[in-house]
Amino acid sequence: MTMRIVTCVAAVPNPDKVKWDRFRQLLDVQDAEPVLNPFDRNALELSADLAKQSGSAFEAICVGAGATAALREAAVFGAQRLIAIEDDALEGADECGVAAALSSAVRSIGGADVILCGPFAAAFGSGAVPGLISAHLDASLLVDAVGVQTSGNGISATLLGEASLQQIEIATPVVIAAAPYGIKARAISPLLLVKAAKRAIESMTLAAIACPLPLPSSGAVDGPLESNRAKKSMELIEGPDAMARAITLVGALRERSAV
């Protein structure tokens, strides 16, 4: 029983490289290279398992800056087709915009029976993307899945329940959000990444996938984030000597109620 399986992944700043600027009360991600959202590894494991059971291949789609880096890691899990949606219009897109772009990408490749996503993104993610995709694609939605398996002529899912695991049959098309825990995801070694770097990645624009513009937005603010080094040059503490610079710095901090 073959099926069309798509995994939607995200690129996030490397959590190990994100710094907290306590003076400006901002997160500095300038030195944090994009990596695969750690929680998407659970969705990729479920995709790989379902693909193996059903004799299918699965595809991985990522939108926005850093998509190529995230897809390199997704290739390690066995994704056969890697699609990066890169467009200037995606800069600053929130979860509503990302979900719209992902949904358009799924439609552009002919749709899918099963769309798997991570539970949320490590960078200010609320977990809304799977639900938004299900609404765009008119598909059912399941969350907190720890397993997806073939069952007769269809598929079933194992979900985290309040007191125990639940097994339910699935009607397709369906969007499945992997559980944040309870799934053993493989380690990604540097050697595997080197091999994955040889895989071809298809790059598409929003126009190529017929994504309506402007992208929708919830209007929510992600939070205190600083990714532009140029802004720091505007806040240099200057003065003729160390004492003058110190006085200027203290004054600036007091204005921000930091001291």
Image (spheres, helix red, strand yellow):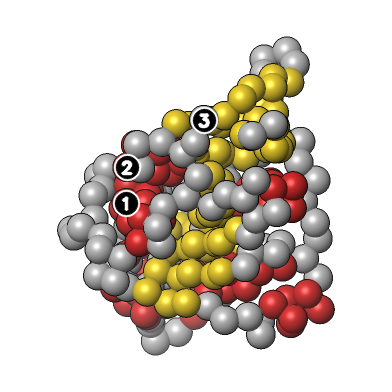
Quarter of the image where one finds residue 146: top right
Instruction: Name the residue beneath numbered marker 1.
Output: 100
Amino acid under disc 1: Ala
Q: Is residue 188 rendered to the left or right of residue 32?
A: right
Give yes or no for contact between labels 3 and 1 (Cβ–Cβ under 8 Å): no
Amino acid under disc 3: Ala
Instruction: Name the residue beneath numbered marker 2.
Output: 136
Residue at 66% over, 85% down: 198
Q: Which of marks 3 and 1 is in front?
A: 3
Residue at 69% over, 22% down: 167
Residue 256 in percent (x, y) is at: 36, 52
Question: Residue 230, relative to residue 71: is it above or below?
Answer: below
The CA span between labels 3 and 2 is 17 Å
Q: Is residue 164 rendered to the left or right of residue 3?
A: right
Question: Residue 100, relative to residue 187: is it above or below?
Answer: above
As drawn, the label of residue 171 is 3
Crowding at mark 2 (Cα within 10 Å: few <14, some 14-19, many 20+): some
Q: Could you tell me which secondary element the residue under label 1 belongs to?
A: helix
Q: Is residue 131 rendered to the left or right of residue 161?
A: left
Question: Residue 159, relative to residue 252: is it above or below?
Answer: above
